[in-house]
Amino acid sequence: MTMLSVYETAKDSSEQIKKIDPVQRMQKDGKNLACTITVNAAETFQSFEGFGGALTESSGYVLSRMPEEVRQQAIDAYFSRTTGNAYRIARIHMNSCDFSLGNWACVPERDETLDSFSMERTDKYITPLARAAEKSFGGGLSFLLSPWSPPAWMKDNNDMNHGGHLLPQYRALWAKYFVRFIKAMQERGIRIDYVTVQNEAAAKQIWDSCLWSAEEEGEFAVRYLGPELEKEGLGNVKIYIWDHNRDLALERMDASMAVAGASKYIAGIAYHWYSGDQYENIREIARKYPDKDIMFSEGCVEGGPRNGAWFTGERYAHNIINDLNSGATKWIDWNIVLDMEGGPNHVGNMCDAPILADGKTGKLYFQSSYYYIGHFSRFIQNGAKRLETQLSSSMTPATVSGHLTNEMESLAYKNPDGTLTLVVMNRTEADMVFNLDVRGAGNNALHRTALRCPPRAIQTWLFAPSL
């Protein structure tokens, strides 16, 4: 294979996702070799379908207060295929979420006819942002729709917050509510391709939330939402369950899929990162349900903004590498933009985002997480097939950093055009020298080189197939 180029982002460097001459990162003498990364280019796994981010009311509000050219800069930074991170998916919420300016619903008062259904609140900040993202992408952007809570009057606690449950008598009406919203977005030029039954279905939160058992999610998909989508000509919209953490993902998938008819209506599972790694659950779902899709649908650094921090990018890359290596086909970040306080959030649940915006100065602050995501999203093409990578140590990791795990991680894909994309991350404070060993059919060597990744850095290596 022919080495084409390498792109690099390193802590304290002046340029990010910088294209450099591969010769600068070759270690000709092989000194200080720490590990070998072996890529099996002969066997492929799941296809990749894209990265994305969430267009919350808070993100729309923050960007609406920025100068027009700065607002466009932020949108292009994510969705432009030529100058940005080439996001292919955008997540939007139906009714309010915690990253809204307050609780609201499209039908706020009891109306079992849904005649009072209104998109006024959605159209204020979310629809303009969705249209701008679609335009920046150049058309064909996919949208994921998720509810945090039904209207309060549909719930047993009469409150959009603090959990509660959808009243059984409103299940059919709630399915119609989904359809009403999806059609309204279609009228606005926004195509909903995916829906989740409920965001964080097991979380009783102080913000917008609603509790569903796994069986209830399965039954709702099979008996109500799936048939209603079909009846209204929306059978192409894919339904995902769970939309919560990895820790219970396998248990929830098993229980939802046990509902009669689930294989027809449930397209797959969506999940978040807030409970920790637990990648074994994702790998087992991929093994047990090879015909079902696995979508990472939300992750962020909690506890407020971390402007200028480097660990945030490394956290993102660690999750992306392990999620995709475990079988995920889509990877969607949370808020695309927040203010310098990590909001607004109507209950004070402040978080970080890859881009922070200062409404007072009109300036954007690009975080390490933005660049780290770009090392994957800009170079792994739609339809790329994952390759297996294995890391073996020539020296103990502790020799380099004093730590034993997660110091060097890697991910490889074969793109539809035949190129190979390899992403490697070094989380130590020292240069990481590694042998790259690419193997083809029959374990034949296709490429072997000693390379160097700088301290606290991420690299994307691109290779052309041998003629």
Image (tube, rainbow, N blue to C red):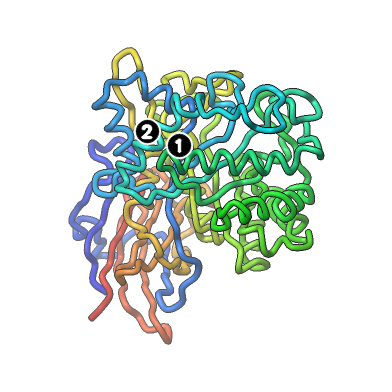
Residue 163 coordinates in the image, percent (x, y):
74, 30
| Residues at circles 2 and 1 in contact by the CB criterion of under 8 Å | yes
* Badge 2 density bin: few <14, some 14–19, many ≥20, Cα 10 Å: many
Residue 125 coordinates in the image, percent (x, y):
44, 26
Residue 30 coordinates in the image, percent (x, y):
30, 64
Mark 2, residue position: 367
User: Is residue 1 placed above or below 305 in the rendered structure?
Assistant: below
User: Could you tell whether 56 is left or right of 151 in the image?
Assistant: left
Residue displayed at 30% across by 42% down: 136
Q: Which amino acid type is marked by label 1?
A: Thr
User: Is residue 413 placed above or below 138 in the rendered structure?
Assistant: below
Residue 144 in view here: yes
Q: In which quarter of the image is the N terminus?
A: bottom left
Residue 235 coordinates in the image, percent (x, y):
58, 57
* Badge 1 density bin: few <14, some 14–19, many ≥20, Cα 10 Å: many
User: Could you tell whether 374 is left or right of 239 in the image?
Assistant: left
Mark 1, residue position: 312
Q: Distance between the residues labelled 2 and 1?
A: 8 Å
Residue 430 in view here: no
